[in-house]
Image: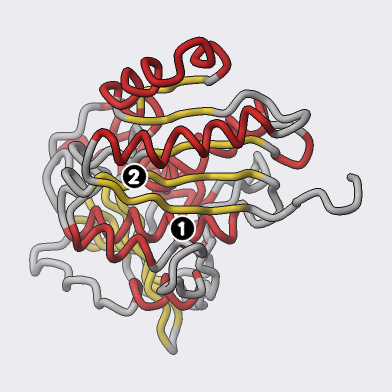
């Protein structure tokens, strides 16, 4: 790599509340990508309506910008978004991950639908600074105040290095994880050993279709293997689709990236759980760690 070539992840944020505001942020950014020597075409991941605005404004240059509907990119959990970005960079980015990505979250679906969804999204934004730190990728996260709302925007500012309220990702995620988990319900089902077959049978009895029960049971088994040795009973509760499993480890995880970094193929662990479950909550304490999986 030549001297002076940028190698660090450039994670930016744009806030707008009008169509013109969106274009004022997006067009210069995409133009920067188009002008970057030796870099693949920039990518716009946005609301289809905003993609139409971009195509009209770009004119002849539209053919040189890859447009992806954000509903096709953000299809599940925060961990799914990490995996999607990593896969795209591997397949399409230039040397060292060089590419410009305009990224507009989906606020009319899961992300932002509740305080918990917002927390998961801010976690993703914060951890992106660590996960993609070695990459020469330039990302502009586009926040529309007409859909995201002021509380979401204020929280997102803390996860973007180009704002004046940016916080260290480890500190920010630790703050998010300082909120105690709700206590398990009184009727939670204890299981001495979280064998996949037993978890699958329980999940099917609670209404999960067989294929979903298999995914949930595998997530539980992989998490149990990653947490071994376990400390105490595994607990199961809920009704389909929101089946929940809580596992207790005898050791702390002490890793905000646990389950966000692709593991060896033969040991998927928390990575698998984060890919198939809507939520994976981790809470370390002085005696070990509690991990709670919720399928949907």
Which of the 4 image quadrants contains residue 41? Answer: top right
Which of the 4 image quadrants contains residue 164? Answer: bottom left
Location of the C terminus by quadrant is top left
Q: Is residue 41 left or right of residue 140?
A: right
The one nearer the camera, 115 or 138, is: 138
* Position above or below: 173 against 201: below
Percent position (x, y) of residue 31?
56, 31
Percent position (x, y) of residue 103?
43, 38
- Whether residue 178 is visible to the viewer of this picture, yes or no, is yes
Location of the N terminus by quadrant is top right
Quick one: which residue is furthest to the bottom in this view? 286
Percent position (x, y) of residue 83?
52, 39
The residue under label 1 is 224
Bin the neighbour count of mark 2 within 10 Å (Cα to Cα): few under 14, some 14-19, many 20 and up. Answer: many
- Say which label, 1 or 2, has the lower sequence index: 1
* Position above or below: 271 against 201: below
The residue under label 2 is 277
The colour scheme used here is secondary structure
* Position above or below: 2 against 54: below
The one nearer the camera, 203 or 256, is: 256
CA distance for labels 1 and 2: 15 Å
């Amino acid at each position: 790599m030549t001297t002076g070539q940028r190698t660090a992840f450039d994670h930016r944020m744009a806030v707008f509340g009008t169509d013109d505001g969106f274009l004022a942020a997006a067009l210069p950014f995409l133009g920067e990508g188009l002008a970057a020597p030796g870099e693949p075409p920039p990518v716009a991941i946005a609301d289809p309506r905003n993609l139409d605005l971009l195509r009209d404004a770009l004119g002849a240059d539209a053919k040189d910008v890859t447009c992806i509907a954000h509903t096709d990119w953000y299809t599940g959990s925060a961990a799914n978004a990490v995996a999607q970005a990593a896969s795209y960079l591997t397949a399409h980015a230039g040397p060292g991950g060089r590419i410009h990505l305009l990224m507009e979250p989906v606020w009319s679906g899961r992300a932002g639908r509740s305080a918990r969804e917002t927390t998961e999204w801010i976690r993703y934004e914060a951890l992106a600074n660590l996960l993609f730190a070695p990459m020469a990728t330039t990302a502009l996260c586009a926040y529309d105040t007409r859909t995201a709302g002021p509380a979401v925007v204020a929280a997102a500012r803390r996860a973007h290095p180009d704002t004046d309220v940016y916080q260290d990702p480890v500190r920010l995620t630790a703050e998010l994880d300082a909120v105690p988990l709700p206590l398990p319900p009184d009727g939670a089902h204890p299981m001495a050993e979280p064998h996949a077959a037993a978890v699958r049978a329980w999940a099917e009895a609670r209404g999960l279709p067989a294929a979903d029960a298999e995914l949930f049971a595998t997530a539980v088994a992989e998490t149990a293997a990653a947490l071994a040795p376990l400390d105490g009973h595994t607990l199961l509760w809920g009704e389909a689709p929101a089946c929940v499993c809580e596992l207790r480890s005898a050791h702390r995880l002490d890793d905000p990236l646990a389950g966000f970094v692709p593991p060896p193929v033969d040991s998927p662990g928390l990575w698998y759980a984060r890919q198939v479950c809507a939520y994976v909550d981790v809470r370390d304490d002085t005696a070990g760690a509690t991990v709670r999986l919720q399928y949907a």
